[in-house]
Image: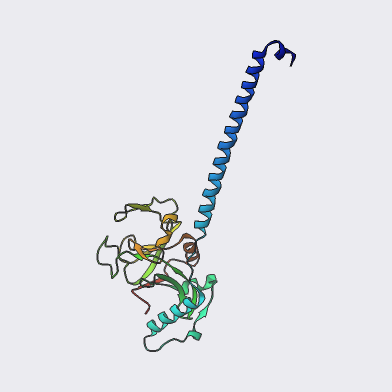
Amino acid sequence: MKRFNKNPNMLIRYIIMQYKKIKITYCLFLKSLIICLFLYMFTLCNVSNAEATYRLAENDLIQMAVNYFSLVQGTSVVEFSEVMLSLNAPPSDLAKITWVCSKKEHVLLALSETDKVIYGGWMVATGRNPGQKIKVGDMRTPEGVFYVKSIEDSSFWDSYFDKATKERIGYGPYFIRLEAGWKGIGIHGTDDEHLHEIGTDASHGCIRMANDDLLEVVSMSMKGQKVVILESLN
């Protein structure tokens, strides 16, 4: 302090230098804090959306299976008590699984027609336009009996462009391609921005679902499984 007593200007310069150092440190700290908060909020949003699921309640699952089995048998109504619920499909049962999609109810079911067992059910989005598919680009989901052609990793695919909404939509982690007589028809996921379309007429013709639900479907899928797409289960 003696040198500052002899030269007051040095004291002033010293105080200014210390102030600048404190200001720079404070600004860096503030910027780091803002970045950390942003990353934290971004992570929270992604985790929340990634965990979105649209599984059907057990009673609804069984009732829809009853409707389907009754529809298939035609001559008799299947009772509620005849349908079994098994939420874990053993590997030995995968070949028995039939995938049933009802466009009106916007559901996808995994069930065994031979054993009257239902393994799961989820809300999905189907074609934007109702009715049977008649031409490429008509945004209708084809109705009929089809088969799983392949299960493809679509995690690196580019999103596709929706001409109607001018938005880009992701395929999710997998694309279950169907032998449906139409190119590009399958079961796939979506992105966070289009989760709200699950349960509506929104797709270009595919069966679109939440990614977490799609992972469950993929775990029970194999080439050659039957896929039945109906206008309605009622």
Q: Nearer the viewer, residue 66 or 145?
A: 66
- Residue depicted at 32% across the width and 61% down the height: 204
Task: Please give left or right for residue 194 compared with residue 216 in the image.
Answer: left
Q: Position of residue 109 (x, y in %)?
A: 44, 72
- Residue depicted at 54% across the width and 41% down the height: 35
148 lies above or below 65: above
Q: Position of residue 31 (x, y in %)?
A: 55, 36
Task: Please give left or right for residue 60 compared with residue 31 in the image.
Answer: left
Q: Position of residue 118 (x, y in %)?
A: 49, 76
**Residue at the right extreme of this rendering:** 2
Q: Nearer the viewer, residue 113 or 125?
A: 125
Q: Is residue 226 visible?
A: yes
Q: Position of residue 233 (x, y in %)?
A: 38, 77
**Residue at the top extreme of this rendering:** 6
Q: Nearer the viewer, residue 158 or 152?
A: 158
Q: Is residue 151 visible?
A: no
**Residue at the bottom extreme of this rendering:** 76
Q: Nearer the viewer, residue 36 or 150?
A: 36
Instruction: Tell me the quadrant of the picture where the C terminus can be found.
Output: bottom left
